[in-house]
Amino acid sequence: MEPLIKTEGLYRYYGNYCAVRNLGLELYPGEVLGLLGPNGAGKSSTLRMLAGNLAPSAGQIWLNGVDLQSDPIQAKRALGYLPENPPLYPELTVDEYLRYCARLHRISGAAVDEAVSDARGRCGLDEVGQRLIGNLSKGYQQRVGIAQAIVHNPMVVILDEPTVGLDPVQIREIRSLICNLGRERGVILSTHILPEVQAICSRVLILHQGEQAYAASLKQGVRPAGGCFLVRLTQAPELAAIMAMPGICSAESLAQGRYRLQTKKDLIASQLAEQLVQAGWGLEEFAPEQPGLEQIFVRITTGEQSG
Amino acid sequence: MILTIAGRELRSLFLSPLAWNLLAVMQFILAWLFLVQMENFTRLQSRLLRLENAPGLTDLIVVPLLGNVAIITLLLIPLLSMRLISEELRSGTFSLLCSAPISIYQIVLGKYLGLLAMLGVILSMGAVMALSLLSGGELDLGRLAAGLLGLGLVLAAAAAIGLYLSTLSPQPVVAAVGSYGLLLFLWLINLAAGAEGKGSALFAWMAMPTHFDRLLSGLVRSSDLIYFLLIIGLCLILSVHRLDALRTRP
């Protein structure tokens, strides 16, 4: 399968400062790739380069198999891009603006209205079509920005912090929109919000100081090895007693009879629960935890700096 | 694609009060000057009748009118052109154009055509005023056409200069000040030509009025046309280069 985005040895310098260093990434159809990283890690620079807004200092980018540098117009046909600040004209109405965007992306006359009403519907903008963009709230403006990125039905959608400024209900809607986009197309998005990545991304890439620091598929979940569980036991047994059970790597006592248990790979959740019940400790809560990403993120972004 | 961008530019211009304001103020001042010229003409009419080969309506009203349109519009163009690119750079909407499948020269031409359409409105306002004299007299239509061509070229060259300067800075006001400076310089540089002896030919050639005045007097020379086309072409090419460099430079 041909990748929708492919980069090789991507570098970007601002003066002497290196914002992106030797980045190679690939995005396949049906994937949602999350770009994570602390502030200044090079996320936006990377996305701007992929969207053709910033020329790389070195390296190559292919969008849908077309070289972005040598044939930018053909390559950008496959592209929908939402920058950090949505590129909106406050003096236009939502419909006028989306129609303009559709035309810019070479949608021909008759199909424009259809494309606009489709994008409007998908982003929940049907009631505000006639309103001026400048009068909309931040959340609606953000949605107009997303609508702009998908109005021409691109194969590659690049979203720079798409859920900033949205309320929780809108965030859920936009996430499900992104998941839908990610069925047949490729989506690449940047965010600070870790649960967001776990909720919608099929793959994650953590950038740190412009370099790829971690990459993993999230379909199987990110776990260091084995599993991690949060349990609550009314009997509050000694840690040593828990550690003595087979298959437990480590145990940590939290407040109010809660424990965090690391298990070995071969111990599955049902076995662990059975063991705990048989031990007669009064199992009250049992929740598999997905801590991996946050731990990895913190380790990469703080650990490497000090070390 | 170019027309889409030009259309959006024009639409945004007329959605803001700026364009309407400018047109209203412009029309008022032009009408005033027009009436003053008319008054002068009717006062002189009896004396003119006695002259042989006397200057007519075209000389005494139309030519000064077109000259006034040129000067007033030159004062307004930086206000219209300053937002063209710099506003998009400042508000981040430029990335919409950058990530769309269009080339930079299409962006530049689209913006330029949008501004030209606006200037076309101003030009036609002046033309209609001049043509209104036909209701009560006769005009040298050939000379009027030459004058309008000259006026159009002056405005188009000024618009190109304004467009280029607006690519240089994300601050519209900076772009406006720069355009004022450059336009005034090109308008006044022939003052030096009058004072100096030999080197002045170059200054005279560089000055816009030298070429504009010839067109106003009904003389259409290809060298004058080329002067304006050179300015337009140079500024548009520089704009394309500048916008292209924005992507690569830090």
Image (cartoon, coloured by chain):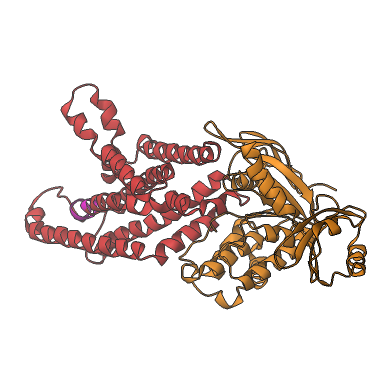
Chain colours: A orange, B red
Above or below residue B29? Residue A206 is: above
In this image, A272 relative to A256: left or right?
A: right
Query: Of A40 and B192, which appears nearest the observer?
Result: A40
Residue A75 visible within the image: no
In the rendered view of the protein, which quadrant contains the C terminus of chain A? top right
Q: Which residues are magenta?
A: B58-64
Above or below residue B70? Residue A120 is: below
Residue A304 visible within the image: yes
Query: Of B123 and A288, which appears nearest the observer?
Result: A288
Tell me which residue sits at (43%, 49%) in the image. B86
Image quarter of residue B38:
bottom left
In percent of width and height, residue A126 lies at 61, 76
Residue B62: in magenta span: yes
Tell me which residue sits at (14%, 60%) in the image. B36
Question: What is the tally of numbered marks visible in this picture?
Answer: 0
In percent of width and height, residue B25 lies at 26, 62
